[in-house]
Image (cartoon, rainbow, N blue to C red):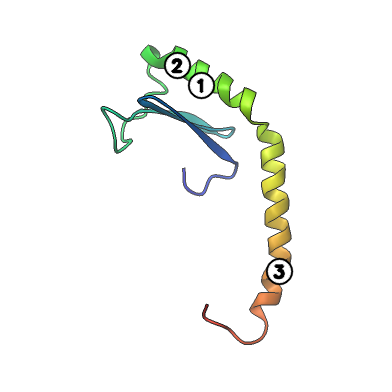
């Protein structure tokens, strides 16, 4: 989800790709039958166990609250520099 207001993580295992974000619904794609990731299988009851397993792996691997705090700290640090970059001569890098 472009423009998400929280960190997102993904796990790829075999034919499946799982995308997790605390504030967005989970996404699950079968990359063999859907390489363009057009059909989200996460809400399909046939894949509920897989979504649960992937969600447990996400929670075991990442501390999403700490991840979010680190991202916001980094953004705040960069925002301090932004006004300074707007002053003076523009250099087209």
Q: Secondary structure at mark 1?
A: helix
Q: Secondary structure at mark 2?
A: helix
Q: CA distance from mark 2 to mark 3?
A: 44 Å
Instruction: Residue at 62% x, 87% y: name it.
Output: 89
Q: CA distance from mark 3 to mark 1?
A: 38 Å
Label 1: how many residues lie within 10 Å, few (<14), some (14-19) or many (20+)? many
Residue 38 place in picture, x, y as percent: 31, 35
User: Marks 1 and 2: in contact by CB < 8 Å?
Assistant: yes
Label 3: how many residues lie within 10 Å, few (<14), some (14-19) or many (20+)? few
Q: Secondary structure at mark 3?
A: helix
**Residue 56 sits above or below residue 21 on the image:** above
Quarter of image, res 40: top left
Residue 76 place in picture, x, y as percent: 72, 57
**Residue occupied by mark 3:** 81
Question: Any mark on residue 50, and which?
Answer: 2
**Residue occupied by mark 1:** 54
Residue 19 place in picture, x, y as percent: 48, 32
If you read the primary sequence from the N terminus, does the residue marked by circle 2 or circle 3 appear first?
Answer: 2
């Amino acid at each position: 989800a472009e423009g998400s207001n929280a960190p997102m993580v993904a796990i790829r295992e075999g034919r499946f790709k799982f995308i997790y974000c605390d504030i967005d619904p989970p996404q699950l794609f079968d990359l063999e039958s859907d390489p363009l990731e057009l059909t989200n299988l996460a809400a399909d009851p046939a894949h509920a166990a897989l979504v649960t397993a992937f969600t447990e792996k996400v929670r075991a691997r990442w501390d999403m609250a700490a991840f979010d705090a680190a991202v916001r700290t980094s953004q705040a640090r960069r925002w301090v520099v932004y006004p300074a970059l707007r002053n003076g001569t523009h250099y087209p890098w």
